[in-house]
Amino acid sequence: MRILLGTLLAAATWAGPACAQESVSTYLARIAAIDDAGPKLNAVIVTNPAALAAEKAARGVAGPLAGKAILVKDNIETKDAMATTAGSLALKDNVTGRDAPFIAALRAAGVVILGKTNLSEWANIRSGASSSGWSGVGGQTKNPHALDRSPCGSSSGSGAAIAAGLAWAAIGSETDGSITCPASVNGIVGFKPTVGLVSRTHVAPISHSQDTVGPMTTSVRDAALMLTVMAGSDAADPATAEADARKGDYAAGLAAASLKGVRIGVLRKQAGTHPGLIALFDAALADLKRAGAQLVEISVDFPPEMGRDEYAVLLYELRSDLGAYLRALPGKPPIRSLADAIAFNKANPAELRWFGQDTFEEAEAMTDEAVYQKARENSLRLAGREGIDKLLAEHRVSFLVAPIGAPAWPIDLVTGDHSIDAGAGNLAAIAGYPHLSVPMGAVEGLPVGLSIMGAKWDDARVLNAGAAYERARTAVLAKPSLKRWGE
């Protein structure tokens, strides 16, 4: 066992395409060695008891995803004998026996569901003072690049698991930054599609205006392969009405994708002020320029009321959307509304040990529909028509780029997250537009992703740009150390 553990620890410091050929048994052994034991990443909440049988069945399926083992964020339902908890002890026994539609599509393509990943509880909407990657069910997820540093959230376990080589790929979900930030600080690729391209049915919600699911992988190509299968219309999710008409083969154009002559808007102010982060971003811009891109510097400040009104929208929709989801769950879960979840947490001290539920309580009190409607119209206008759309048109650029955000900050369960200000991903989140995080290097061994944002339904072009940047990138990417930072 000691020899196996040492071998797996060494293998886990690498993440790359060769992982695509690894077996379910190898992934399960690695999860046991470094997630449940060793450094104890706490990225995986539960493994699928049917994974080995599913791998055997996948041998008869044709296609590029057949036999590929993935992990699924634990706010997404699968029909396996695994609970869907959203990280909350209230749902620890919530085995629904049903697949989210995009999960069913992945299964049909031969994908093996390996297990469920930890997350920031309730997708990080419970409190403004939370620690990213902590949940009542899964505990605190660690960043494999620096065990004492944050994995970011809320798709924390998905990001950490792929960085550590615990699966071929993972699924995350995002309302604002929950795919792209974990991808960035864990040094992997994360793609948030246009809202409405992938169904959200049987996914524990925050906001029907902004929620989406997306792939988290080690390459843009792998993300594109997954999105090709995941995308599609779902009669139960009205936002996806156009998806069948908009979807395509997202991997088809990647090999020939070029940045030659492509005008790219550089959000200079959103790069922040940290010298190491700025230097890393400048190196990525130099790579883009060498690949033939025409860089257009854009100096813009985004109005604070955009974020203020987004928050009002999330509060209002959380109360209604989560309540509807909980009421529709099969079986007899102990909560059927946001108010029930608040009461459950008060009755269970373990849930409130590290931080409270102030955001939940604000959402429960947010019942003014007129205020909500005005906030939604205003935030969407500022991020969409007068945000991304206006910047793309006025500067005649195809994409906007910036750092995704800051390098990973120290985990602090007592006082919560502390991160320096950088990035502009809330634009794409609020507008519902595609947003890609691609690794661009590291600051003192801590990964940071390049943010690439495009227009609504421009998912294929954004992925193509990301693939072209991957080929042009000169930075040496950090490998997970499975140690504390600086050791």
Image (spheres, helix red, strand yellow):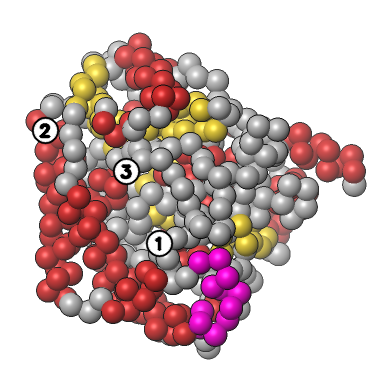
For the view shown, which residue lies furthest in the left direction? 394
Magenta span of residues:
344-355
Identify the residue at image location x=57%, y=81%: 348
**In the rendered image of this protein, does residue 249 appear above or below residue 194?**
above
Q: Residues within 10 Å of mark 1 (few under 14, many from 20)?
A: some
Q: Which residue is mark 2?
A: 393
| Residue 174 in view here | yes
Q: Which residue is mark 1?
A: 128
Q: Position of residue 114 (x, y in %)?
A: 64, 56
**In the rendered image of this protein, does residue 158 appear above or below residue 262?**
below
Please tell me in which quadrant of the rendered image residue 100 appears.
bottom left
Going by the numbered disc 1, the residue's amino acid type is Gly
Q: Residues within 10 Å of mark 2 (few under 14, many from 20)?
A: few
Number of marks in the rendered image: 3
Give the distance between the C-alpha atoms of the residues marked 1 and 2, in whole angstroms.
35 Å
Residue 350: within the magenta? yes
Give the distance between the C-alpha atoms of the residues marked 3 and 2, in whole angstroms.
19 Å
